[in-house]
Image (spheres, rainbow, N blue to C red):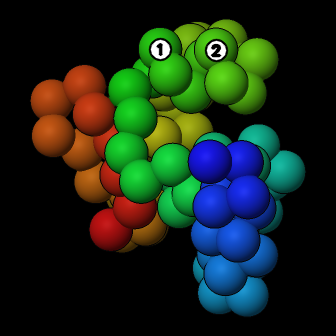
Amino acid sequence: MSQQLLTRADEATTDLPTDLDSASSKLVYLYLRTAGECTVDDLQSSLAMKKISLYPLLKSLSKKGLVDSDGETYYTA
C-alpha cells in the first residue's frame, strides 16, 4: 500500500497547481490526491494538523476549484 501511495504521490507532484501559496495547502492537496478521498478527521490524524487549520485550507482549496466535498468527505476536483 505504501508503495502505491508513493507512486501516486510522484504522479501528483508533477501537476501541482501553481496558485497554491502555502506549504499547508500544498500538503493537504497532495494528500487528497494520493488518498483519493478522506474526512477532516482522516486529514487531522494523518497530517497531524488541527481541525481549526484544516477547515480554512479546505475552504480555500474549494474556492479555487481544486477540492470538492460530499458531506464530510473531501476529494480533489
From what the image shows, is residue 29 above or below residue 59?
A: below
Apparent side of residue 21 relative to residue 39 in the rendered image (left or right): right
Viewer-proximal residue, 11 or 19? 11
Instruction: Identify the residue under disc 1.
Output: 41
Residue at 53%, 61% in the rendered image: 33
* Position of residue 6 measured from the top left corner of the image (x, y, whole percent): 75, 62
* Position of residue 14 measured from the top left corner of the image (x, y, whole percent): 73, 87
Apparent side of residue 76 relative to residue 25 in the rendered image (left or right): left
Q: Using a 10 Å C-alpha cutoff, classify the residue at mark 1 as few (fewer than 14 neighbours), some (14 to 19) or many (20 or more).
A: some
* Position of residue 67 measured from the top left corner of the image (x, y, whole percent): 38, 57
Q: Amino acid at mark 1?
A: Asp
Q: Residue furthest bottom?
A: 14
Q: Using a 10 Å C-alpha cutoff, classify the residue at mark 2 as few (fewer than 14 neighbours), some (14 to 19) or many (20 or more).
A: few
Viewer-proximal residue, 29 or 59? 29
From where the camera sits, is residue 60 visible?
Answer: no
From what the image shows, is residue 58 above or below residue 71?
A: below
From what the image shows, is residue 24 above or below residue 11?
A: above
Q: Are marks 2 and 1 in contact (CB under 8 Å)?
A: yes
Indicate which disc residue 45 carries: 2
Residue at 76%, 43% in the rendered image: 24
Residue 29 falls in image quadrant:
bottom right
From where the camera sits, is residue 1 visible?
Answer: yes
Which element carries disc 2, helix, strand or loop? helix
Viewer-proximal residue, 17 or 5? 5
Q: Amino acid at mark 2?
A: Ser
Quadrant where the image shows the C terminus: bottom left
Indicate which disc residue 26 carries: none
The residues tagged by marks 2 and 1 sit, at their Cα atoms, a distance apart of 6 Å
